[in-house]
Image (tube, rainbow, N blue to C red):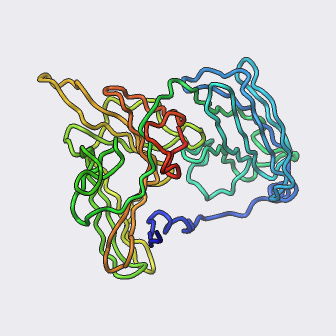
Amino acid sequence: MNRFYIVIVMLLSGCLIAGKLFAAPPEVEKARQHGAQGEVTLLVVDSTGKPVEKAKLSVAFWGSDSSADVVASEGQTDPNGLFVAAGKTIGSMNYTITKDGYYKTTGKYWFYRPSGLDSNKNSAASPTSGEYWLYHQQENSVKDDRWQPWNPTITLVLKERRQPIAMYAKRIDAPVPVRDTPVGFDLEVGDWVLPHGAGKQADVYFTYKANAQDFWTGSYELTIACSNKMDGLVRMRKDMWSEFLSAYEAPNDGYDTGVVLSLDMTKDKILKKDLFGAEEYLIFRVRMVLDDKGNITSARYGKIYGPIEFGRIGKVEENRGGVRFTCYFNPTANDRNLEFDPSQNLFNWRHDARERPYMP
């Protein structure tokens, strides 16, 4: 069935963020054109900070902007979890780290980036892209045809496989049944509750509001609220550098009762936005029951991977909406484990395999 689905997040994907850039000194420009030697020591640790021995590393140094001019090499970490990577590059190095019993880690190390792209002028690691870089004063970036600082030690995390479990995992792509009214959604069943779907218990309520004047002008809002005031949601950032994107366990506290996403735009500019991107996820605690002393006797846990996309379906004047997200629901009460085993999806996918999640 063909349908017109405007995904809010995609409306912003092509936007450019302006930064104040400065001209690089001659030695940096030369290195950016013809390359310079770079060296970095990678310290590979697990999620507890323990060094990982015999982890396999594949590194690639970019000798130019062409993929045909990439020098790749492989090796293993020593007993202290260390690996030295060296090569000629115009400014970056890609890496992949693997080991049996661990989730793959990937990323990029920047020996050079133009100043003005970020306010942090010190060593930094991106929490969302898995890319490591070092900011330097430009006059000190290259010395004797070598990127500076020479051979810094960078710590990389290789998350171990602990206890992957079976879960109810499903990609949701569904029209919101009604507008401007909270609609219950069963996170275990993965559907709206009766009479709008096959769901039996409303774990959260989705409220979609829209006021669209034309294709580009309008305001949109999606509220996700827990049906039980004792339940909650925690908004988190994914470990984008790892194959396993989330925390291992749901937290004991820090839950909010809901999340409000919004976009207000005109043809010329975006007036307001609070979107839920691909680098984010929600941890939820639902169906919580307390004893007479206020202690939790039962609760269910899981996660929703972003992006949480919401937008217009059909004709502009109808202001009908839809939502998209991926949900993981732990089947065991009081188990806070969030480590999903993709080979043990509790949904039957014989007739709907296209929606089967593959991420842990």
Q: Quadrant of residue 216?
A: bottom left
Name the residue located 39 percent from the left edge and 74 percent from the top edge: 314
Furthest residue toward top: 79
| Nearest to the observer: residue 73 or residue 154 | 73
Q: Examine the rendered structure and indicate whether residue 285 appears above or below residue 264.
A: above
Name the residue located 20 percent from the left edge and 41 percent from the top edge: 228
Name the residue located 22 percent from the left edge and 24 percent from the top edge: 297
Image location (x, y in percent) of residue 193: 26, 51
Q: Is residue 95 left or right of residue 89?
A: left
| Nearest to the observer: residue 150 or residue 128 | 128
Name the residue located 33 percent from the left edge and 71 percent from the top edge: 219
Q: Examine the rendered structure and indicate whether residue 121 appears above or below residue 344.
A: below
Q: Examine the rendered structure and indicate whether residue 118 appears above or below residue 250.
A: below
Q: Examine the rendered structure and indicate whether residue 173 appears above or below residue 5.
A: above
| Nearest to the observer: residue 20 or residue 245 | 245
Q: Is residue 75 left or right of residue 53?
A: right
Image location (x, y in percent) of residue 224: 30, 52
Q: Is residue 85 left or right of residue 338?
A: right
Image location (x, y in percent) of residue 254: 31, 36
Furthest residue toward front: 351
Q: Quadrant of residue 210?
A: bottom left
